[in-house]
Amino acid sequence: MATSPTARWEHAVVTGGSGFVGSHLCAALLAGGAKVTCVDDFSTGTPANVAGFRDHPGFRLVEADVREPFTVDADPDLVLHFASPASPVDYLRLPVHTLETGSLGTRNALALAHACGARFVLASTSEVYGDPEEHPQNERYWGHVNPIGPRSVYDEAKRFGEALTTAAHSRGTDTLIVRLFNTYGPRMRGHDGRAVPTFIRQALAGEPLTVAGDGRQTRSLCYVDDTVRGVLAAAAHGMPGPVNIGNPSEISMLDLARWIVELTGSASTIRFIERPVDDPAVRCPDITLARDKLEWQPVVTAEEGLRRTIEWFRTQQTE
């Protein structure tokens, strides 16, 4: 591309902008010269995540629940719908909220984008593939999801959001669906239930690292800077998606736990716990579409990304 993926946008609205990925999106858009309106109800995000640019002249923070219709002061040319509980701890605590954010929230964000003639980006997830029977997963795979299992509130919220976005596209809204795979990095919460922050928190505290099952299940970890770069590249491209944004390198949860113990210099041991119901055995994106159409692929190595994330967690402990 001749220009940065952020350069074409004048005003972006980011729902869930005070969350983990959302806050990094806000920062990247501001750095690219766009004005940014962050819309968040702080049910899982925190104002601390956007504190570093609260005084930026192009940034505005709006406290609002996207499950209700919402407005912004100036028409956007980009709406990124990233609002949703995303960790097991959150969506199991807020099951109806999660479903309504994926349905009503998506509808309201789409309505804003349509009214303003803006490009709309839905943050979907690899969870739409469920416990996959195809490996790696490409965008043509329909998935293997339990619609009434404990994870279903998140899986089905995102699947419905994709269907609603597709319907809006057929009626003339400029839409994009991105499916994010296991993003990690600074600003994750240590108690959100996901593997990377849980293991880092436990290792830094000298506690046993709790590995579910036998630890042989795999995930594909993508550092947040790479994820944001992929999302913005897809937004600028104009494709409707869905497009996988993730790292095609797999790692088992047991190997991840051992690696984090080594990188932190911790004396922690490994403790095996019961594996959650419907926990996927494998998870790995086929990123051929992103490579071919967006010329995008992850560039931050797992070791470098984990080191950066560990250092951020260390900083939080000393503040």
Image (tube, rainbow, N blue to C red):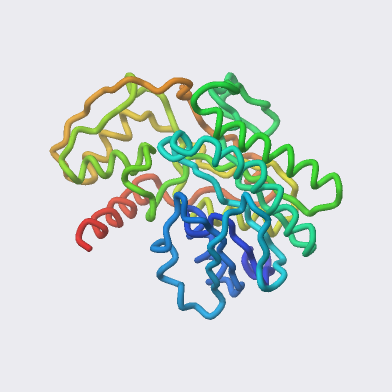
Residue at 52% x, 51% y is 227
Furthest residue toward bottom:
57
Residue at 29% x, 39% y is 199
Which corner quadrant of the image does residue 101 belong to? top right
Furthest residue toward left:
267
> Front-most of 2 and 11?
11
In this rendering, position of residue 39 left or right of residue 190 = right
Residue at 44% x, 20% y is 277
Q: Is residue 89 above or below residue 148?
A: below
Which quadrant would the C terminus be assigned to in this image?
bottom left
> Front-most of 44 and 310?
44
What is the x, y in percent for residue 23? Answer: 48, 60
Which corner quadrant of the image does residue 302 belong to? top left
In this rendering, position of residue 64 left or right of residue 208 = right
What is the x, y in percent for residue 186? Answer: 37, 55
In this rendering, position of residue 17 left or right of residue 293 = left
What is the x, y in percent for residue 201? Answer: 26, 44
